[in-house]
Image (tube, rainbow, N blue to C red):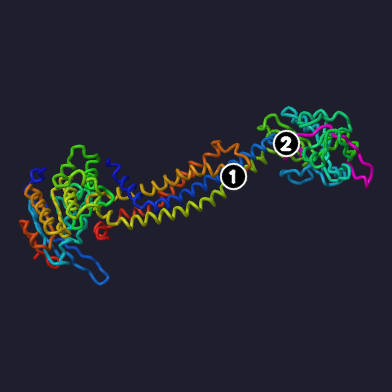
């Protein structure tokens, strides 16, 4: 038994002597560590997953005509859809404005205009509303990927989103009537391609939409040279701020004409919100560690009470106060380390299941940003344990040796 | 192991000057020691006797630096304990004083060997590789097999032998014994007293609290305390 070990040995033996009590105290730490680490990992995986999903549209700037309302926020599917008709003029970007935007932004990436309208569509007996986009046929292959079929070459050809195709059981060659047959003539278009699923995006939401040429759109709704929005796909996401500022500075010099939606900012905002949520959930999980701390404190106080006589003996034969303090801090620390190690092992297993259930994918589970919560929770668990042992240790070291020796 | 040769000088090993100990209680102050003055030379064997509550244990606690006097001075090896802080007093208990208790007071979590080795480790900060601890245990009649047992597994006599070995392990100049045979049968008690007397014959200063006149006979000098005063 080495000198530096003798105090440590006494701590270990005390834990072994009261094995069940020690195990129960350590169990509190195990639960606390598992709760914190699992919640942290879940939050990290959720953030990583959402970031990945949204980063695809992070390089998109959407310019819309401003009607004096503030910019920002997610656009509804189909831009100004639902307003009926062609919309009022102040809601649309003019050809001149588009030229200015193109002049500024074309060196940073692809700039294209977008006509959009919400209208009734009929497929056989089924009727519903859908978004109709009108795009430059040269731009369509550059921004959209097809899962089936080909890009539209004729005016009457359209490509449609996956959800729409599934809902109406539409295939290549299927026909769709656009417009309400009760209110007037409809336009019949033919499906030539199905767009790969894109999910929600700031520029255009294609999954439930019909995309045709500008010519088709103008033929149905008119409004040539009046665009629902202008989209800019940046080559470098870091240019977002520069391009956005430049457009706003030049076009809004005299009066506010356009607003720019910067997707990267939205991404930051969502990531930040998820981070706040993760912290909040972890804080709730942290309550279990506080309960564990009370348990450790209780066990340590019991240990001190039961060992008063032993403390008296140790003090009377020349053990310094600091060494008595160490003995109890070691005891709390050992409980903390055992609890934290078991908790860490369990949180990896439980975390995996929770992430799979809540996020739906464990793709990011083994990344450092996710796994960092395991050592962090361990550290918090150990620190809480040691802190819980400080007062009992202090109390033990300050016992009067004579009083302590009298204890039975 | 001869503490006398290293510490022998003209000044007394222990000196109490007007030592008073008062315990303040809600019912009124209790004067446990009342201006006690006492001088003990190196190598003496002193028995402290007196009826229950006379203050003999309080006196022993003062001598063992487990307690501080309310007033007066206690000098040990020429140093005034009043001027020492807790750290220094603990050091004095570790290096200069060996304590033998009536109830043995061994640490139940440690084996017999580890109990004896404990103060050695505290003092030398390294394990005993000289066989000193084992030698002391053998001297006390504790063999290797017994030394591996924990105190609750041993008899009272065996525990007290281990306690004596522990008290001697750091080669203290003073041996304080508080009713060392109080929890032992007469035969075992006699054996322990022989051991203590032998240690005194080797030059160790022994102060022993007892109420048993037979045990007190081993001492060369007897001090009787009554109502906190030396009679």
Q: Which residues are magenta?
A: A178-206
Residue A98 picture location, percent across and down: 80, 34
User: Residue B101: x, y in percent?
Assistant: 18, 56
- Of helix, strand and loop, which mostly describes the magenta segment? loop
Image point (27%, 52%), residue name:
B108
- Asked if residue A318 shows in the view, the reply is yes
Q: What residue does disc 2 label? A: A61
In front of the other: A373 or A72: A373
* Residue ranking furthest to the left: B220
Q: Work out which quarter of the rendered image holds the C terminus of chain A and state it.
A: bottom left
Quarter of the view holding residue A160: top right
Q: Is residue A180 magenta?
A: yes
Where residue A319 appears, as percent x and y from the top left, is 25, 49
Disc nearer the start of the sequence (2/1) = 2
Residue B109: in magenta span: no
Q: Relative to the observer, which residue lies in front, B15 or B225?
A: B225
Residue A267 position in % (x across, y down): 66, 40
């Amino acid at each position: 038994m080495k000198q530096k070990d003798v105090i440590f040995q006494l701590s270990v033996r005390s834990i072994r002597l009261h094995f069940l009590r020690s195990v129960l105290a350590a169990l509190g730490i195990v639960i606390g560590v598992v709760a914190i680490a699992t919640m942290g990992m879940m939050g990290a995986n959720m953030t990583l997953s959402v970031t990945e999903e949204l980063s695809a549209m992070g390089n998109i700037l959407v310019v819309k005509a401003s009607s004096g309302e503030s910019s920002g926020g997610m656009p509804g599917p189909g831009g100004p859809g639902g307003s009926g008709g062609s919309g009022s003029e102040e809601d649309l970007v003019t050809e001149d404005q588009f030229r200015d935007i193109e002049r500024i932004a074309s060196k940073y990436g692809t700039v294209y205009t977008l006509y959009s309208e919400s209208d009734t569509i009929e497929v056989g007996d089924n009727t519903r509303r859908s978004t109709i986009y009108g795009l430059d046929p040269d731009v369509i292959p550059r921004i959209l990927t097809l899962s089936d079929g080909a890009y539209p070459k004729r005016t009457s050809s359209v490509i449609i989103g996956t959800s729409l195709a599934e809902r109406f059981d539409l295939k290549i060659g299927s026909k769709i009537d656009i417009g309400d047959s009760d209110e007037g003539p409809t336009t019949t278009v033919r499906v030539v391609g199905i767009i790969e699923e894109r999910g929600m995006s700031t520029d255009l939401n294609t999954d439930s939409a019909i995309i045709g040429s500008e010519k088709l759109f103008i033929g149905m709704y008119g409004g040539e040279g009046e665009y629902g929005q202008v989209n800019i796909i940046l080559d470098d996401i870091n240019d977002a701020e520069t391009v956005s500022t430049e457009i706003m500075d030049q076009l809004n010099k005299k009066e506010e004409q356009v607003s720019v939606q910067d997707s990267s900012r939205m991404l930051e905002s969502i990531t930040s919100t998820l981070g706040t949520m993760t912290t909040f959930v972890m804080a709730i999980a942290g309550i279990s560690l506080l309960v564990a701390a009370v348990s450790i404190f209780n066990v340590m106080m019991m240990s001190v009470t039961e060992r008063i006589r032993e403390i008296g003996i140790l003090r009377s034969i020349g053990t310094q106060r600091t060494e008595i303090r160490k003995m109890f801090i070691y005891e709390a620390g050992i409980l903390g380390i055992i609890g934290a190690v078991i908790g860490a092992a369990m949180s990896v297993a439980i975390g995996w299941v929770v992430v799979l259930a809540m996020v739906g994918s464990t793709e990011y589970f083994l990344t450092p940003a996710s796994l960092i919560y395991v050592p962090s929770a361990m550290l918090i668990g150990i620190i809480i344990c040691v802190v819980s042992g400080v007062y009992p240790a202090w109390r033990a070291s300050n016992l009067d040796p004579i009083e302590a020796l009298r204890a039975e | 192991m001869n503490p006398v040769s290293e510490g022998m000088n003209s000044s007394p090993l222990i000196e109490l000057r007007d030592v008073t100990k008062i315990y303040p209680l809600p019912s009124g102050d209790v004067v446990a020691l009342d201006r006690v003055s006492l001088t003990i030379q190196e190598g003496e064997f002193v028995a402290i006797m007196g009826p229950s509550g006379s203050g003999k244990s309080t006196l022993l606690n003062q001598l063992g630096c487990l307690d501080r006097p309310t007033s007066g001075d206690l000098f040990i090896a020429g140093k005034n304990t009043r001027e020492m802080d807790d750290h220094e007093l603990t050091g004095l208990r570790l290096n200069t004083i060996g304590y033998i208790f009536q109830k043995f007071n061994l640490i139940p979590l440690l084996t017999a060997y580890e109990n004896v080795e404990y103060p050695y480790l505290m003092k030398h900060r390294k394990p005993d590789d000289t066989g000193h601890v084992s030698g002391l245990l053998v001297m006390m009649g504790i063999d290797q097999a017994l030394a591996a047992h924990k105190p609750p597994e041993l008899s009272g006599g065996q525990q007290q032998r281990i306690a004596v070995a522990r008290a001697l392990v750091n080669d203290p100049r003073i041996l304080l014994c508080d009713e060392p045979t109080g929890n032992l049968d007469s035969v075992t008690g006699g054996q322990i007293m022989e051991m203590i007397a032998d240690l005194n014959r080797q030059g160790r200063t022994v102060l022993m609290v007892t109420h048993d006149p037979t045990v007190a006979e081993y001492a060369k000098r007897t001090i009787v305390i009554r109502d906190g005063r030396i009679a």
